[in-house]
Image: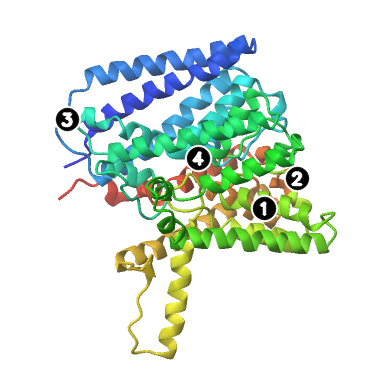
Amino acid sequence: MGFCYKSIGKILSRVLAMLGAAMFLPVMTALAYGEYVCVRAFMVVSIPCILTGLILAWIIPYSAHNMRLRDGFFLVTLTWLLLASISALPIVISGSMPNWIDAFFEMCSGFSTTGATVSDNVEALPHAVLLWRSFSHWIGGMGILVFAIAWMPALGISGQEIAEAETPGPVLSKISPKMSQTARDLYLIYIAFTLIETVLLLIGGMSPFDALTHSFATVGTGGFGNYNDSIAHFGSTYIDIIITVFMLLSGVNFNLFFLVLRKRFGDAVRDDEFKAYAMIFSVATLIIAFYGTAAGTFDDFFEGLHHGAFQVASILTTTGFATCDFGLWPPLCLMVLFILFFIGGCSSSTAGGPKVVRILIMMRMIARSAALKLHPNAYITIKYNDRKFSTDTVQGICAFIFLYMVTLSCLTMIVSLDNYDIVTSLSAAASCLGNIGPGLGAAGPAYSFNIFSDGVKFMLSLAMIAGRLELFTLLMMFSRRFWLPDE
């Protein structure tokens, strides 16, 4: 048996229609700001998307076959690449980024919630394009297919296979009996966070446009801003604190918020991954604050705590905002941030990176190996939240970490073909693969990824999608066995 093409086509038709409908937001923005070139550019793409989606939904017959995991992997990969490709068209047509590779990079960065940009002057971009970039973070943060899952019962299609292929993290837990209800519950929390942050940023003096776009980018842990100096443009401690809080909240496993809503606060704070996440943030912030103050980078400890907490939250949650050019910080502070490149947020959050739970399990595996050296006959299990981790899950985590490092090594070599220094090449590769945003060196927060050649930018674009889909989902497409029919 091959792929369930009817079910895949049925879902793709809905996704195309939703993408076309989503473009009406930048259309309305363009109308409000008198950017009529952008109105035409987005409408030229939006209307065909909607019509194509509706026509395909009408002509593709209902399929009684449930989708399998392989169908989910294929659908997710196809959808994300298609979304980035189509979404880049209005940016090219409007003339904001005439080079399609640049626009494709920008939208891969948007949907994957990376936040790396090829624009040397973000402030010169039209408001409609700025909003579309940030809104792509919001769409990609929770996953457009997770949104589609909420409506799949009407199609007779199970969403678990798709969610497992798209949701960041080694395990996706159902928080409601049905996957569609789980998707709707997740989006309600997601929308609530967005609205609350928008209101708080408005109170802090942001314009409605800036408040909305920065909320999209924060809750989606993306990091696209409207100004060349990112969050530093506002010069507000209040705004910095609000964004720091919401970056940290968005990097938490969203399942824990349901425990809080059900008054199981103790269970939420006792979660092993959450405790590790909080500890990593606290330790990294204190190191930067203390050492940066001692080195004279900050005027006093509280300034160090302010910028340290913001930047640690930004890198740990893979958001990518900046309140200053941290590339000028002392080497120890930069090393702390660089280590965070390889951690990321919690599983089942909008953050990227390898995820805290994987790092935690790897550390417990190391401790177990050391203990067995001393006590070869001991029976020592690896536990997570007082439950024994299955051997298959542990092996899967080891395989992912190994694949992540191999992919990073290969990607760094590809980036190095542009003849930049090792810090720039390695950090650019790690930033895109981990969906972080700014790198170090010539790819730091004060610069853009426009320094790289089109070929390298295209490979980094694919790396951003691969990182967002947890590597295996995209890389499986290159496996011969994946395309062979079931026996």
At which x and y percent is residue 90? 54, 20
Eye-nearest disc, 2 or 4: 2
Choose the circle earlier in sequence order: 1 or 2. 1
Q: Is residue 442 left or right of residue 463?
A: right
* Nearer to the camera, 454 or 236: 236
* Res. 26 visible in picture: yes
Q: Tell me the distance, in whole angstroms, between the alpha carbons under discs 4 and 1.
A: 24 Å
At which x and y percent is residue 216? 55, 33
Q: Secondary structure at mark 4?
A: loop
Q: Secondary structure at mark 3?
A: loop
**Badge 3 amino acid:** Ser
Q: Is residue 132 left or right of residue 56?
A: right
Crowding near the residue tagged with mark 3, few <14, some 14–19, many ≥20 C-alpha atoms within 10 Å: some
Choose the circle earlier in sequence order: 1 or 3. 3
Name the residue rendered at 38%, 17% in the picture.
50
At which x and y percent is residue 322? 69, 44
Name the residue rendered at 82%, 54% in the picture.
298
At which x and y percent is residue 230? 70, 37
Q: Which mark is residue 324?
A: 2
Choose the circle earlier in sequence order: 3 or 2. 3
Choose the circle earlier in sequence order: 4 or 3. 3
Judging by the rendered image, the residue that carries numbered circle 3 is: 63
* Nearer to the camera, 5 or 16: 16
* Nearer to the camera, 58 or 323: 323
